[in-house]
């Protein structure tokens, strides 16, 4: 159903003008997660029940802010039942509970892009794996991938998604990626968390002498702060940046592809 038709139907059912309906939502499996912003509690209940019936969903959640380093969304079940959901994306199965796990369909292009960059024979370390957003689709295309996750709920679903997708060469690591025990092992490091910059030194240690880091960040528009920091690092041969999506009115979700040669750093000493 087109969004314009959906809004018209929800407005008719609830009696709420279309202009007052929330526009920020995503449907995952048989659940919908809505950012209601300034809607009244009474309107939220009406809208939730209308979506449940119209789209034949199992659950309707209101989402608040995403909490700290554990990436736990603040959600409230408004209608239906709280239950894990399955989202299938290009043949990849993601199983998770949307009430406690963050999943962004808006990052789909980035998952495609990264999957196209990896090469057979590579060893990859995903420092902030979550439920396997990047790790699972990459696994069939590389030699091995180590997937680090600190959130026990996300780690549970990472293990489950490994099994569902038969990703035998994916090796889960439970704990802080800053404590990941192997160094000089990776051809590529994925840093899909907005706090990635704080772990960049660890990523350098995980990399072999040459490799690539994909660093994600929430960066203010027209800011060159991260670029200036990368320019100061001798290990960095070059880098390229790309906007993943808008994160807020003043901030973009950015990814930096950083090409590293640690031998270059040694030769300068």
Image (cartoon, grey):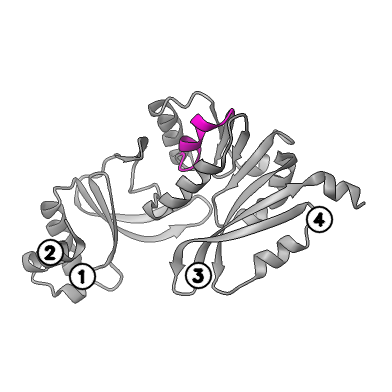
Residue 88 found in image quarter: top left
Q: Taking the image as drawn, is residue 129 in sight?
A: no
- Magenta stretch: includes residue 156: no
Please name the residue that numbered disc 3 is placed on: 251
- The residue drawn where x is 67% and y is 57% is 239
Q: CA distance from mark 1 to mark 3?
A: 24 Å
Circle nearer the N terminus (1, 3): 1
User: 10 Å neighbourhood of mark 3: few (<14), some, or many (≥20)?
Assistant: some
- For the point 45% across and 66% down, the residue is 246
Q: Position of residue 153 (x, y in %)?
A: 43, 39
Helix, strand or loop at mark 4 = loop
Q: Mark 1 or mark 4: which is in front?
A: 4
Residue assigned mark 4 = 234
Q: Please say if the residues under marks 2 and 1 sit with CB atoms less than 8 Å apart.
A: yes
Q: Which residue is mark 1?
A: 21
Q: Secondary structure at mark 3?
A: strand
Using the numbered discs, state the Cα–Cα distance from disc 2 to disc 1 in whole angstroms: 8 Å
Who comes first in sequence, dot 4 or dot 2?
2
- Secondary-structure class at tag 2: helix
Q: Quadrant of residue 254?
A: bottom right
Which residue is identified by label 2?
10
């Amino acid at each position: 159903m087109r969004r314009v038709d959906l809004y018209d139907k929800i407005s008719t059912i609830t009696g709420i003008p279309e202009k007052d309906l929330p526009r920020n939502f995503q449907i995952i499996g048989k659940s919908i997660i809505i950012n209601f912003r300034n809607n009244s509690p009474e309107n939220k209940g009406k809208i939730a029940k209308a979506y449940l019936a119209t789209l034949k969903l199992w659950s309707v959640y209101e989402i608040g802010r995403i909490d700290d380093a554990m990436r736990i969304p603040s959600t409230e079940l408004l209608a239906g039942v709280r239950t894990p959901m399955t989202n299938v994306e290009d043949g990849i199965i993601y199983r998770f509970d949307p009430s406690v796990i963050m999943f962004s369909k808006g990052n789909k292009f980035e998952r495609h892009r990264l999957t196209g960059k990896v090469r057979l024979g590579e060893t990859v370390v995903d420092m902030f794996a979550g439920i396997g957003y990047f790790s699972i689709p990459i696994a069939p295309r590389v030699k091995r991938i180590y997937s680090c996750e600190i959130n026990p709920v996300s780690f549970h679903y990472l293990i489950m998604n490994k099994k569902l997708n038969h990703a035998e060469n994916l090796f889960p690591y439970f704990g802080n990626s800053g404590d990941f025990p192997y160094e000089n092992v990776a051809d590529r490091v994925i840093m899909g968390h907005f706090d990635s910059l704080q772990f960049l030194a660890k990523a350098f240690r995980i990399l072999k002498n040459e490799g690539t880091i994909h660093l994600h960040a929430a960066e203010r528009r027209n800011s060159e702060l991260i670029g200036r920091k990368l320019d100061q690092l001798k290990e960095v041969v070059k880098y390229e940046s790309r906007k993943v999506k808008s994160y807020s009115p003043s901030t973009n979700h950015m990814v930096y592809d950083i090409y590293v040669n640690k031998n270059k750093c040694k030769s300068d000493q």
